[in-house]
Image (spheres, helix red, strand yellow):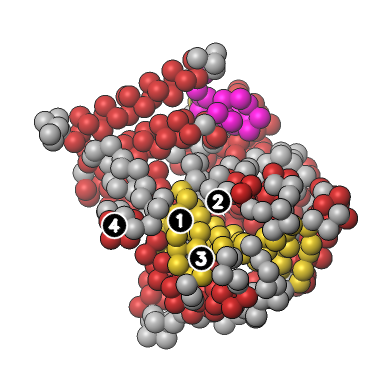
Amino acid sequence: MASSKSPLRLLVELISTNVEALESKLSSQNLQFPLLADPYDPHNPVERLLSEDPAMLEATSVVVAAASQLVAMVRSPVQTMMEGSLLFHLPSCIRAAIESNMVEIIRDSGPQGIHANEISEMNDTDPVKAARIPRLLANHHIFTEIRPDVFAPNRLSSILDSGKSVAELKQSPSSRYVASDKAGIPALVLMHTDEAFKGSAYLTEAFLSPKTAHSTRAVDSPWNYAFGTDTFLFDWYDRPENELLKTRFSFAMACSTKLEPPKAILAGFQWSELSRGAVVVDVGGGVGSAARVIAEATPHIELVVQDRWSVIEDAQQYWAGVAPDLIASGRVKLEAHNFLTPQPIHNAAVFLLRWIMHDWSDAQAVSILRHLRDAATSDTKLVVVDIILPYTCNDPEITNRIPGAERPLPPAPLLRNMGAASNMMYWLDFQMFVLGNSQERTLGHFVSLAAQSGWRVEQVHHIAGSSLGQYVSVPI
């Protein structure tokens, strides 16, 4: 029977119930929920529990989804639209705070904070603007304004901290990205707030222009429109004048793997059930970080990591440092290969494509999958790890016929996709659109591409705490 309670009341109760669940679980282990005033510590047992425990992840998602939906309901629609249309100032200020070393300057002040006049002296900026930028951020809980014009670090601002001294950053700006347990996070945020942010400003032009509206070419992206270039983004990074941006991008991509649970690749497909000596080919596997997790957890199988030769050179250094014995024993092999060309391995038990498909148009995606189908045996499995972009409504036609495809039904009155708790997937979809005219895909979209390529999706895994899911397919 439908509840007689109002949607507002249901949302409030969802927030209350799940906050109680969070605090109860922490209390049972003599832990407390982190305060906004305290810096983020990834090694803190509380943080590990919040990011890895399935029950905690679920409760957190419900709180985020319900709180966001509650705000959407109670606030004036005019105010909501004004807020949405002005939010671009937030990434602008985040970037300014990082690039001006404001994050580290405020960090060094500790809980007593530092006045904007002192900030401006240390980073050679205007004192009034040096107060306005962190104040806007503080209104979004990034920094804390403890007295007029005096700002202190907090939980969210600490995420942007390079861990370096201000002197180091002035001497070597690229050092912001390396040799720190936070290495890469500032790089990832800066890539979002610089190249992608500027490109997104021209999304409408690229969407409507007769020249680019129906194009699937990577060089017809909003980013290309914004920068006035016909050069592919990666080739643009290779230009000498963009060396620092290329370094930043490399560390940003390395950091992106830290945003997922460390062993998420093991949480879906059952690698341990493969037969002894089975060959797993990590197609476009980068340096092989995912293959390493699989190899260490499944000692009876063999792995081949494939990528462009320049990447394989980096992979050789990576494995020499982290697991040289796996290379020496032959259990892990490194192979230069372009996955847009025919696949040379014809005895694979599994072809793995992790974070690959979203880089490519449908036509190129079909080509990649077709090359793997042509090399597959009748028993080969295809495991594609990518975002499974959910609809905001139900889709029983697809989900009812593929095991694992249906996500748990969220409590009423939340959106079918958990609303704001799923935001990252949609942001990344548009990140792909803006930077390369590509996309994340819905379940139905990928099922269609797989069928065109000679594959049938037989299983779907949604991974707790991860924006990524897994499609497991078999040859048709």
Residue drawn at 46 percent across, 41 percent down: 136
Of helix, strand and loop, which one carries label 4? Answer: loop
Of helix, strand and loop, which one carries label 2? Answer: loop
Q: Are marks 1 and 2 in contact (CB under 8 Å)?
A: yes
Residue 401, picture quadrant = bottom left
Q: Which residue carries the number 4 mark?
A: 395
Nearest-to-viewer mark from 4 and 2: 2
Q: How far apart are marks 4 and 2 (CA)?
A: 23 Å
Sequence-wise, which precedes: disc 4 or disc 2? 2
Question: Is 264 above or below relative to 88?
Answer: above
Of helix, strand and loop, which one carries label 1? Answer: strand
Q: What stretch is highlighted in magenta?
A: 32-49
Sequence-wise, which precedes: disc 1 or disc 2? 2
Q: Position of residue 358 (x, y in %)?
A: 52, 65
Q: Position of residue 381 (x, y in %)?
A: 56, 63
Sequence-wise, which precedes: disc 3 or disc 1? 1
Three-letter amino acid code of the residue under disc 3:
Val
Is the residue marked by circle 1 packed among few (<14), some (14-19), or many (20+) residues within 10 Å?
some
Is the residue marked by circle 2 packed among few (<14), some (14-19), or many (20+) residues within 10 Å?
some
Residue drawn at 50 percent across, 41 percent down: 465
Residue drawn at 60 percent across, 72 percent down: 376
Looking at the rendered structure, which numbered label has been put on residue 459?
Answer: 1
Residue 240 in the magenta stretch? The answer is no
Q: How far apart are marks 3 and 2 (CA)?
A: 13 Å
